[in-house]
Image (spheres, rainbow, N blue to C red):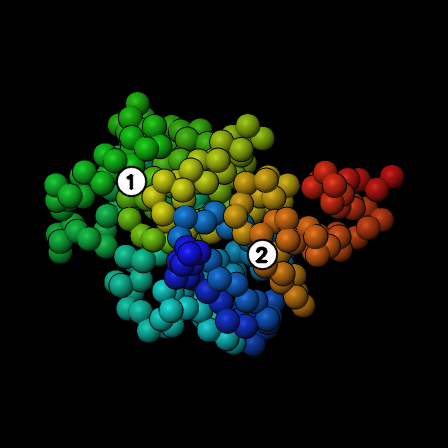
Amino acid sequence: MSKAKPHTTLSAKNISIGYKDKVVVQHINFEVYPSELVAIVGINGVGKSTLLRTLANLQRPLAGEILLKSKSLEHYTTTALASEISIVLTEPSASKNLTVYELIALGRQPYTNWIGSLSEEDEAKITEVITMLQLEELKHQKCFELSDGQLQRVMIARALAQDTDIILLDEPTTHLDIYHKVQILKLLKNIARETGKTIVFTSHEIEMSLQLCDQMLLLKPTSSPFGKPKELIAKGSFNDLFPRDTVSFDAQTETFRITK
């Protein structure tokens, strides 16, 4: 007997995204599941961050519907949503003067009492994610003292401390060298596998995403193919991503090549 497919954690039903009356991308459809690492990729300015903010309910879709565990996103209260979705944006943290421990502790805000004090359960969760991301030696350091790679791990830890089933990250490998880019993406993949969480991130690292992700959304203004990397490659979805007289996609090596 075949194993039953898990229920979707997050899905988009023919949504359009943008600002006010300006549509940036339309006809976006996807379904993501527990334990999946999912990348949203595309050219600069196509709307990757806008989509991520829309999925987090920081702005509304211009059309269509987003479902969180089969329930429309707009039917969730702010408090209920904070226990389901955590988001890490690219804006510089206004909390860099906090220690690593204090910044991670902010992830427990949806669960703390009215005076914001941490319970034993809160402290246990914070300790758990500090251990998971190997931040023990850094937990008393100020965040402004950290490298970009270390700070990114702390921001991921804060999202994990929030203990949501879905984690959204905007460009988590920005400003990192290739070693630390790979390190962060492999860390995210392991977290998804070990915790059962769904992790969705935007990225310019298309080749790395092809190697590491379970599913990918290739954001384009008119059509946005979604599926497993091998399926997207087989369909030729990456062939017209960039002007062919500049960059072409080699399906055999799964890499982009400069057109000479």
Q: Nearer the viewer, residue 116 or 39?
A: 39
Considering every residue shown, the one lying at the far right of the view is 260
What is the quadrant of the C terminus in the image?
A: top right
Q: Which mark is residue 199?
A: none
The picture places residue 39, in percent across and down from the top left corner, at 54, 50
Q: Is residue 246 above or below residue 184?
A: below
Helix or strand or loop: what does disc 1 sit on? helix
The N terminus lies in quadrant: bottom left
Most foreground residue, 20 or 228: 228
The residue that label 2 is drawn on is 227
Disc nearer the start of the sequence (2/1): 1
Secondary structure of the residue carrying tag 2 is strand
Instruction: Say above or below: 209 vs 115.
Output: above
The residue located at (52%, 56%) in the rendering is 49
Residue 165 horizontal/vertical position (percent): 34, 53
Q: Looking at the image, which residue is at 25% across and 35% down? A: 128
Q: Picture quarter containing residue 256?
A: top right
Residue 216 x %, y %: 57, 52
**Within 10 angstroms of label 1, few (less than 14), some, or many (20 or more) residues?**
many
Query: On the image, numbered disc 1 is attached to which residue?
Result: 104
- For residue 68, above or below residue 21: above
Q: Quadrant of residue 220?
A: bottom right
Name the amino acid, label 1.
Ile
Q: Amino acid at mark 2?
A: Gly
Circles 2 and 1 in contact, beta carbons < 8 Å: no
Q: Is residue 144 visible?
A: yes
Q: Residue 164 appears at what percent x and percent y?
A: 31, 52
